[in-house]
């Protein structure tokens, strides 16, 4: 099933993320680490969600990433945990997009764009 990005931008993003390989998730991680920490931290703080929103987003992200456990491997390097965290940062940006500047939004989703994942544009 393909999710319509106009009806459910987060669902469409997560559907694309669910197709990433372990190598692509490692590249997402590297792209995130290559960014200056201060803007990422500020963007994460600006992308605050209510407790209910946070729980709903986290559930959707985990439902997407957990089935990939075999593909990502259960290694000491924390690939599964890193994939969940990186995806959560981007998911929060997608949900909280109206509260973010374009720069804050981009700093949270750009690691996924770097590996070819189409990310929804704010307000799209």
Image (cartoon, grey):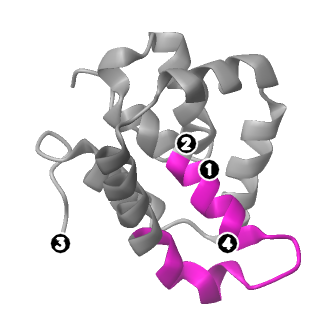
Q: What residue is shown with label 3?
A: 1
Residue 47 magenta-drawn?
A: no
Distance between the alpha carbons at the discs numbered 4 and 3: 24 Å
Q: What residue is shown with label 1?
A: 86
Residue drawn at (44%, 39%) of the image:
92
Q: What residue is shown with label 4?
A: 80
Image mark for residue 68: none
Q: Residue furthest bottom?
A: 70
Residue drawn at (62%, 50%) of the image:
86
Q: Earlier in the sequence, mark 4 or mark 1?
A: 4
Dot 4 lies on which element? helix
Q: Against 52, is 77 above or below?
A: below
Residue 35 place in picture, x, y as percent: 77, 27
Q: Against 64, is 69 above or below?
A: below
Q: What residue is shown with label 2?
A: 89
Q: Earlier in the sequence, mark 4 or mark 3?
A: 3
Q: Against 97, is 53 above or below?
A: below
Query: Label 4: few (<14), some or many (≥20) within 10 Å?
Result: many
Q: Earlier in the sequence, mark 2 or mark 3?
A: 3
Magenta stretch bounds: 64-88
Dot 1 lies on which element? helix
Q: Earlier in the sequence, mark 4 or mark 2?
A: 4
């Amino acid at each position: 099933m393909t999710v319509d990005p106009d009806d459910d931008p987060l669902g469409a993003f997560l559907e694309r993320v669910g197709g990433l390989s372990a190598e692509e998730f490692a590249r997402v991680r590297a792209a995130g680490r290559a960014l200056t920490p201060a803007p990422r931290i500020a963007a994460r703080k600006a992308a605050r969600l209510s407790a209910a929103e946070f729980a709903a987003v986290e559930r959707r992200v985990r439902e997407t990433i957990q089935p990939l456990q075999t593909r990502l491997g259960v290694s000491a390097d924390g690939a599964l945990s890193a994939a969940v965290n990186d995806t959560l940062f981007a998911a929060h940006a997608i949900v909280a997009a109206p509260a973010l500047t374009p720069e804050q939004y981009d700093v949270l989703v750009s690691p996924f764009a770097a590996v070819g994942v189409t990310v929804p544009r704010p307000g799209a």
